[in-house]
């Protein structure tokens, strides 16, 4: 009965979330269903297990959600994201429309700009570029997704994406875990995705297919859609409803001013990870007043938080006078972090209740018994949970909450570098999370004005198949030669 309850709760969560119900309601109800089937105390699991785990996630990662959303909103309102996209378009030209869109998305998201901010800013640029180049509109979502939500989210060393931050407290790693393998994975994802999109473009031209429907992209309508909002806030760290809550600066800054904050994020993250924190005396963290933790458990989060905070100060120093209302932009950015973190925390709470069920031992035994070794089983666990929840961050946290200590024990016994576990877990979570019900996919299609029927197969090939190939290569190289 216990296993049936887990499956029933999960089925309810997935089905109603797909229909647009709020995860804030669904997650505790689904958790209580699992507990009821197992004959476990319901109120205790709600207030102690569910809320304890959810509040722990908020306490640990809210600084990153807050600073990430605030940074993204400042980059949007200052015109920096638009300036970078315009510069990339001018340099690559209409003949390389697909490449321009992909690289513009990659540049801003690797520099710390939220996926959803990038989507809302890049879509009008992509539409104008694709229309001028005669590239089918149906390829826009895949091109934007390839640049914003694949290698810069899960593979490229140092990415400040929340998905790359989540494994750090579990494995004691930094944002630059397994850098060599991350670079190889990034090259595979980018290369495979561009190959597919260029192939699709060539076939469309041969068939005489042009841009298609020239109706303007419904960016504003998508941002205000309740369904898009519910799904989007589970998938990433920015609430789309805050996109239009503040005014943009008139005009665009120079490319140097626009790109400077992205450079600051990368460099400060690097300096904090390899030079500052390793020399920092953090013995005091072992005291009860600091939660009895260690520097290894918090260093990764601290590195990214300081990097984002430094970049925010740079934007304010360079562009505050150009913003119509600094307060309105700051308020919108801060508010944009609230619903996403509570939505993901609710998924984490559901996972904690499921993991506390006696029947979960059967699931644990099945996962750990998957052939191919711990890297394969870890990849399967993060893939499946990200697919079911429609959230890379939610699925990843659930998997590591339940199985992270076990994998660390296996790593110590078998001499596996925790950095390798980190990179496999993040890339694994970033593959099947792009199924049709994923919030980023739903948002992207709505903003671009296309449908699943028109565009989803290209998203699958550019974002899922390429990522799976990269994941397989990382696991193979990690098994043969270890982490590097």
Image (cartoon, rainbow, N blue to C red):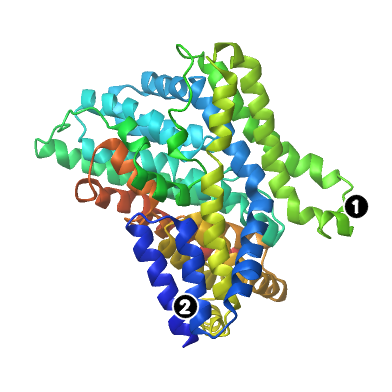
In the picture, the quarter occupied by the C terminus is bottom right
Q: Position of residue 383 (x, y in %)?
A: 46, 64
Q: Which residue is mark 2?
A: 6
Under tag 2, what secondary structure? helix
On screen, residue 386 above or below 444: below
Contact, mark 2 vs mark 1 (Cβ under 8 Å): no
- Residue at x 60% of width, y 16% of height: 320
Q: Position of residue 275 (x, y in %)?
A: 79, 40
On screen, residue 383 above or below 273: below
- Residue 176 can be seen in this image: no
Within 10 angstroms of label 2, few (less than 14), some, or many (20 or more) residues? many
Q: Which residue is mark 1?
A: 284
> Is residue 74 found left or right of 197 in the rendered image?
right
Q: Residue furthest left?
A: 208
User: Residue 93 or 454: which is nearer the viewer?
Assistant: 454
Quarter of the image holding residue 302? top right
> Is residue 211 found left or right of 143 in the rendered image?
left
Give how far apart the Cα atoms at labels 2 and 1 are: 41 Å
User: Residue 134 or 36: which is nearer the viewer?
Assistant: 36
Q: Position of residue 479 (x, y in %)?
A: 57, 68
Q: Position of residue 227 (x, y in %)?
A: 34, 47
- Residue 109 can be seen in this image: yes
Which mark identifies residue 319? Answer: none
User: Residue 282 or 16: which is nearer the viewer?
Assistant: 16
User: Residue 177 or 219: which is nearer the viewer?
Assistant: 219
Q: Residue furthest bottom?
A: 1
On screen, residue 180 above or below 115: below
Q: Residue furthest front?
A: 43
Quarter of the image holding residue 68? top right
- Residue at x 68% of width, y 61% of height: 171
Q: Which numbered mark, 2 or 1, is in the foreground of this view?
A: 2
- Residue at x 50% of width, y 61% of height: 395
């Amino acid at each position: 009965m216990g296993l049936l309850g887990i499956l029933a709760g999960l089925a309810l969560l997935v089905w109603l979330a797909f229909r647009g119900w709020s995860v804030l309601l669904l997650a505790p109800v689904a958790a209580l269903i699992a507990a009821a089937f197992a004959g476990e105390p319901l109120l205790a699991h709600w207030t102690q297990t569910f809320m304890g785990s959810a509040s722990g996630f908020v306490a640990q990662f809210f600084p990153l959600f807050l600073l990430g959303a605030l940074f993204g909103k400042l980059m949007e309102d200052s015109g920096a994201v638009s300036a970078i996209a315009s510069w990339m378009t001018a340099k690559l030209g209409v003949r390389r429309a697909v490449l321009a869109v992909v690289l513009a998305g990659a540049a801003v998201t690797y520099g710390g700009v939220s996926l959803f901010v990038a989507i809302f800013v890049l879509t009008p640029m992509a539409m104008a570029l694709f229309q001028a180049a005669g590239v089918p509109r149906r390829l826009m979502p895949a091109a934007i997704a390839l640049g914003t939500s694949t290698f810069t989210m899960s593979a490229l060393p140092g990415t400040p994406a929340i998905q790359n931050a989540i494994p750090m407290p579990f494995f004691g790693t930094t944002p630059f875990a397994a850098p060599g393998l991350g670079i190889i994975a990034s090259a595979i994802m980018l290369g495979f995705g561009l190959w597919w999109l260029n192939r699709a473009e060539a076939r469309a031209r041969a068939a005489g297919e042009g841009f298609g429907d020239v109706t303007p992209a419904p960016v504003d309508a998508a941002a205000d859609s309740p369904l898009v909002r519910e799904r989007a806030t589970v998938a990433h760290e920015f609430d789309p409803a805050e996109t239009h809550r503040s005014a943009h600066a008139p005009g665009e800054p120079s490319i140097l001013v626009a790109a400077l904050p992205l450079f600051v994020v990368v460099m400060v993250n690097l300096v904090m990870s390899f030079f500052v924190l390793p020399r920092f005396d953090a013995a005091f963290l072992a005291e009860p007043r600091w939660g009895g933790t260690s520097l290894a458990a918090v260093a990764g989060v601290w590195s990214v938080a300081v990097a984002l905070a430094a970049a925010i100060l740079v934007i304010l120093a360079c562009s505050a006078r150009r913003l119509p209302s600094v307060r309105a932009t700051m308020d919108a950015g801060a508010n944009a972090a609230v619903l996403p973190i509570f939505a993901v925390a609710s998924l984490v709470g559901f996972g904690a209740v499921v993991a506390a069920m006696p029947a979960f031992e059967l699931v644990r035994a099945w996962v750990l018994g998957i052939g191919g070794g711990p890297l394969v089983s870890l990849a399967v666990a993060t893939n499946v949970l990200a697919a079911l929840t429609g959230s890379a961050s939610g699925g990843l946290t659930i998997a590591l909450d339940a199985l992270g200590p076990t994998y660390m024990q296996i790593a110590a016994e078998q001499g596996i570098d925790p950095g390798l576990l980190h990179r496999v877990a993040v890339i694994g979570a970033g593959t099947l999370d792009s199924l049709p019900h994923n919030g980023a996919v739903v948002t992207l299609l709505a903003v671009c004005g296309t449908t699943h029927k028109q565009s989803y197969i290209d998203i699958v090939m550019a974002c899922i198949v390429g990522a799976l190939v990269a994941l397989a290569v990382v696991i193979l190289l990690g098994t043969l030669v270890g982490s590097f």
